[in-house]
């Protein structure tokens, strides 16, 4: 086919002209943008990039001493709101009618779902609440009024109709996320772990405050930038999550100490109680309990009495007084002292022994002075040798460690140092006109009055006696870790290599052993038939306002010691303040110490079960109802086959031949769970995690609960669980 040349020429001309016109159009728009509209686009460019904002890191966890159990962690909490005018409903009447019809069609199922997830309102009340927001055209209408939701509740709510829409303009759902500090073990060691100031994420006490810089991490930087009409988050600097802190707290030992102390506090209707369990060699605080009675009759961890409360220690201080006399060479264990009939005039003030109404102890040797906890015996020995040189006695107290600063104030807010005042002489070199000293000061100081010692200092002093004279500072944190790997370990802090001469130490250790193990010792009830215990009882009268004579007085009873005596592993102090009609450190604090010591000691026993089994036997241990993961881990160590419901959190166990079958225990988030058969730790966690205040009575397995299983949980529920 032959083409006409004139047609080709015409078409080419048209293409060239169009190309030239397009080039002129492009050039014109470039000129317009760069010159005519220059200021406009500069402003747009400045608006499209927002100011740099802080990108918060995840706060590190606080772990138990084995580094495996989380004692405090950060979990998100949520508040949900609905924008009923989203998707153009505020401007377009048709869009408003469409949104209303969708809500009216789904409001019954949504109300029913909300009631099942968060039963703070009834199904009917939820419907009325949502209709009020819908009809009123509310922009930020709370889904669950005044309720902070956990992660599980949040995930269930966003599966409900309308809320599951991915397009937020259609659903109108607005999610506000809060960082919440969660404690899986409830109130265990709550005061030591510490707290945060809610949404501010600022540490206020305990380990949270002491190691805040480690836990907090480092914030990053992010800004919003408009790219192709969409705003994107541009990360300038990635945040660095906080390190995990590995504490020295042993969860099971903490549970042992708390349950033993709580039971005695209820029995005595005591004002408060403290228990500290310390590892001898390292000073690691394995458990620390601070319980205070509130108006409802229950006990809570509110104040750090163990570290911050300055108390007159009473008779536990007598050990330090006798140690100073022995170490200075003024007293020998073979010395005798006449305590008379139990009442003696000490420089114008009468001092009594606890058995003064039975005729007193008369003449006793130094070991029996501590075994009988004789006020007169200790005071006479110290006053005889130090009355004219009290400074030497106070210097001796500081030397043996009872008055040594422990360095805790730097790490723990509110931690107190011991206060043992140094006598000041007047202008003539005497004490007659001294404002801070009197003739009776030394006598009463020697038996634990006129001094203020926090329980942690008394425990540390006795720990040094158990540790061969080496005084180590209490340690609450072993180190920091990242992803299960230790990054830094904190060393044991030795305050003093020797608190006294070796002979003095040996003599004191022998006397403390006799206080508990000798039939004449007042500390017999702190002892144990399975192993030997050493320690000292303490009883002091404390004022509760108005002075000793005019105010209401209480008693501070205590026992501090270590076990086993022949190879000490743990030091423990138990202190209880009460207004019971009788007071006895040995009879009231001693049994708590004994219970703690026996349970902790048995916890650390390991026995090869194969020695007691023949070739055909299979050892099946008794399995409590409780945490499935823990039960499986233990049974796996015994090579016991596990079957049944192993994917749930809690289960009961039955032995079937050579295996253990687990059966799920139903634990609803909205109703009281059945904790029968559980141990104290699992039972308390299952109840406290659902907001039920729990009181424990006895030890062993749960055999009864005051609120039946399946009962709907109400705000402020209190339950008593009985263990046997």
Image: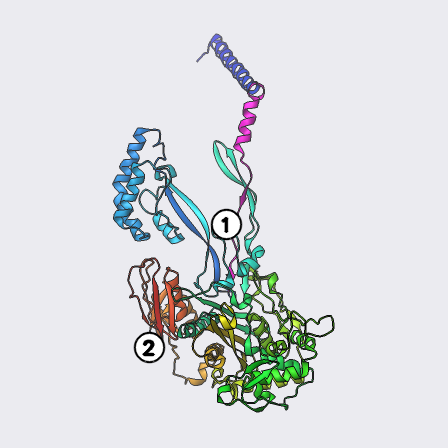
> Where 597 falls versus 39 (above or below)?
below
Image point (38%, 68%), residue name: 695
How far from the left and from the top, in percent, is residue 305? 52, 67
The numbered disc on residue 445 is: none
How far from the left and from the top, in percent, is residue 107? 27, 43
* Quadrant (top left/top right/bottom left/bottom right) for the N terminus: top left
Residue closest to the eye, 366 or 518: 366
Observer able to see residue 483? no
Residue closest to the eye, 632 or 708: 708
Image point (29%, 33%), residue name: 98
Q: Is residue 61 magenta?
A: yes
Horizontal side, residue 61 vs residue 691: left or right: right
How far from the left and from the top, in percent, is residue 185? 44, 64
> Where 358 falls versus 601 (above or below)?
below
Horizontal side, residue 431 vs residue 357: left or right: right
Q: Secondary structure at mark 2?
A: loop
The numbered disc on residue 657 is: 2
According to the picture, the residue beneath numbered tag 1 turns out to be 200
> Where 650 falls versus 401 (above or below)?
above
Q: Residues within 10 Å of mark 1 (few under 14, many from 20)?
A: few
Indicate which disc, 1 or 2, sits on the residue closer to the N terminus.
Answer: 1
Which residues, given as a range, are shown in magenta? 34-63
Horizontal side, residue 523 vs residue 650: left or right: right
* Quadrant (top left/top right/bottom left/bottom right) for the C terminus: bottom left
The Cα–Cα distance between marks 1 and 2, rounded to whole angstroms, is: 55 Å
Tell me the quarter of the picture where residue 418 sits: bottom right
Q: Is residue 579 magenta?
A: no
Q: Residue furthest right?
A: 428
């Amino acid at each position: 086919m032959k083409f006409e040349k004139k047609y080709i020429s015409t078409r080419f001309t048209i293409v060239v002209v169009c190309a030239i016109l397009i080039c002129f159009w492009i050039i014109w728009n470039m000129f317009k943008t760069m010159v005519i509209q220059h200021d406009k686009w500069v402003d747009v460019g400045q608006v499209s990039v927002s100011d740099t904002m802080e990108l918060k890191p995840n706060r590190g966890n606080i772990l138990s001493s084995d580094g495996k159990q989380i004692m405090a962690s950060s979990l998100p909490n949520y508040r949900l709101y609905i924008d009923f005018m989203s998707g153009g409903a505020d401007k377009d009447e048709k869009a408003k009618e469409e949104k209303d019809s969708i809500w009216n069609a789904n409001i019954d199922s949504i109300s029913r779902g909300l009631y099942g997830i968060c039963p703070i309102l009834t199904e009917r009340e939820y419907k009325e609440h949502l209709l009020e927001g819908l009809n009123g055209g509310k922009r930020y209408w709370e889904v669950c009024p005044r309720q902070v939701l956990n992660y599980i509740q949040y995930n269930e709510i966003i599966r409900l109709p309308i809320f599951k829409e991915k397009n937020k303009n259609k659903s109108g759902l607005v999610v506000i996320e809060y960082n919440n500090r969660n404690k899986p073990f409830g109130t265990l060691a709550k005061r030591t772990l510490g707290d945060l100031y809610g949404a501010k994420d600022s540490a206020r006490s305990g380990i949270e405050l002491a190691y805040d810089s480690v836990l907090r991490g480092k914030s990053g930087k992010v800004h919003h930038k408009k790219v192709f009409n969409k705003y994107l988050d541009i990360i300038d600097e990635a945040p660095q999550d906080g390190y995990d802190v590995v504490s020295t707290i042993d969860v099971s030992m903490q549970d042992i100490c708390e349950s033993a102390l709580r039971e005695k506090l209820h029995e005595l209707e005591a004002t408060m109680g403290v228990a500290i369990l310390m590892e001898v060699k390292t000073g690691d605080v394995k458990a620390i309990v601070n319980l205070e009675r509130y108006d409802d009759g229950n006990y809570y961890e509110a104040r750090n009495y163990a570290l911050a409360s300055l108390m007159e220690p009473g008779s536990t201080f007598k050990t330090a007084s006798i140690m100073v006399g022995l170490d200075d060479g003024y007293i020998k264990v073979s010395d005798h002292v006449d305590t008379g009939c139990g009442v003696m005039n000490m420089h114008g003030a009468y001092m009594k022994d606890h058995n003064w109404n039975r005729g007193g102890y008369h003449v006793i040797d130094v070991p029996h002075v501590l075994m009988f906890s004789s006020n007169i015996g200790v005071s006479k020995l110290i006053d005889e040798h130090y009355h004219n040189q009290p400074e030497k006695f106070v210097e001796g107290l500081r030397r043996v460690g009872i008055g040594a600063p422990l360095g805790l104030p730097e790490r723990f807010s509110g931690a107190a140092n011991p206060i043992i005042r140094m006598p000041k002489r007047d202008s003539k070199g005497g004490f007659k006109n001294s404002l801070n000293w009197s003739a009776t000061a030394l006598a009463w100081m020697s038996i634990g009055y006129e001094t203020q010692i926090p329980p942690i200092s008394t425990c540390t002093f006795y720990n040094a006696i158990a540790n061969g004279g080496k005084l180590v500072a209490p340690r609450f944190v072993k180190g920091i870790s990242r992803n299960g790997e230790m990054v830094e370990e904190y060393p044991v802090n030795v305050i003093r290599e020797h608190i006294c001469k070796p002979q003095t130490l040996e003599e004191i250790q022998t006397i403390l052993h006799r206080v508990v193990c000798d039939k004449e010792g007042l500390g017999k009830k702190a002892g144990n038939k399975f192993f030997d215990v050493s320690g000292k009882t303490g009883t002091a009268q404390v004022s509760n306002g108005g002075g000793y004579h005019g105010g209401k007085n209480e008693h501070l009873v205590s026992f501090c010691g270590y076990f086993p005596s022949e190879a000490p592993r743990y030091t423990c102090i138990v202190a209880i303040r009460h207004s019971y009609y009788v007071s006895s450190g040995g009879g009231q604090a001693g049994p708590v110490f004994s219970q703690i010591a026996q349970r902790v000691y048995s916890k650390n026993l390991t026995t090869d079960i194969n020695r007691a089994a023949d070739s055909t036997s299979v050892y099946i241990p008794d399995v409590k109802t409780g945490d499935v993961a823990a039960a499986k881990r233990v049974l796996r160590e015994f090579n016991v086959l596990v079957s049944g419901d192993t994917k749930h959190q809690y289960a009961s166990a039955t032995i079937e031949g050579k295996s253990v079958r687990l059966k799920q225990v139903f634990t609803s988030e909205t109703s009281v769970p059945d904790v029968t058969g559980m141990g104290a730790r699992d039972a308390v966690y299952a109840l406290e995690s659902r907001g039920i205040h729990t009181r424990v009575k006895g030890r062993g397995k749960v055999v009864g609960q005051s609120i039946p299983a399946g009962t709907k949980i109400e705000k402020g529920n209190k339950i008593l669980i009985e263990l046997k």
